[in-house]
Structure formats: C-alpha cells, structure tokens
Image (cartoon, rainbow, N blue to C red):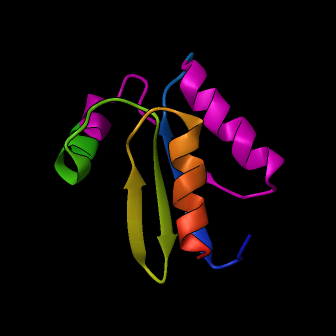
Amino acid sequence: MAQDISVVVWSKQGCSYCNEVKEYLAEQNMEYKTVDVTNHDDYRDILHTKYGVRHVPVVEIGQNNVYEGVTEVGIEHLIAALASVHA
C-alpha cells in the first residue's frame, strides 16, 4: 500500500464491524488513526455533517489532502475504496 495514504477509522467500543475494519487494516499493514465516538455525540454530528450518517464504522481514506468517506457497512466496501485509490 502506498505510504502517502492516510486512513482514519471512526468507531465505537464494542462494535464488531469496527473491529473487523481495524483487523483488516492491520492485516494489510496499513497504519490508521481512530476517532472513538463512544460517549461523544458531537463526533457523530461531525459524521452527519460530512457524510449524512451517524453510524460507525466510517473509514476516511485520504491522499494529497483529499479524503473519501466509506460509509457503507461491510469490509467489501473498504476493500473496493482502497483498490480505487491504487488504480
């Protein structure tokens, strides 16, 4: 994976989908930052403003200061988004 990609995982404690995303990124040796929305409704407000959703996980993939948000639940959506960055 390219070194110039930045990944941010918006997640909450106890979320199996969130853990699946983090495990996948770890398996791919991709570094990522986590924004924990547990007990932070204001963080969910940010997600709503940016992407129109309040659920997690949301994965932001950034390159050259341009970020794409993966808001669909399911690892296949993350895999497709990462592949499009490298296309």
Tell me the residue at 51%/58% (across/down): 81
Please state if 69 lies on the left or on the right of 13 as rendered. left
The image position of residue 52, as x and y in percent, is 19, 43
Which range is magenta?
A: 15-44
Res. 20 image quadrant: top right
Quadrant assignment, res 6: bottom right
Left or right position of 43 against 37: left
Residue shown at the point (25%, 37%) measured from the top left: 53
- Residue 49's spot in the image, x, y percent? 17, 49
Residue found at the very far top of the displayed protein: 14
Depth check, front residue: 48 or 74: 74
Residue 34 visible in the picture: no
Q: At which x and y percent is residue 48?
A: 20, 41
Residue 42 seen in this snapshot: yes
Q: Is residue 12 above or below residue 85?
A: above
Query: How many numbered badges does the structure rendering display?
Result: 0
Residues 77 and 24: in front is: 77
Residue 83, how many percent across, how many down? 60, 64
Quadrant for the C terminus in the image: bottom right
Q: Nearer the viewer, residue 75 or 58?
A: 75
Q: Is residue 6 above or below residue 36?
A: below
Quick check: 63 above or below 37?
below
Q: Is residue 8 magenta?
A: no
Up the image or down, 73 lies above or below 35; here it is above
* Quadrant showing the N terminus: bottom right
Q: Is residue 17 magenta?
A: yes
**Residue at the image point whose x is 54% and y is 20% from the top:** 15
Q: Is residue 36 left or right of residue 67?
A: right
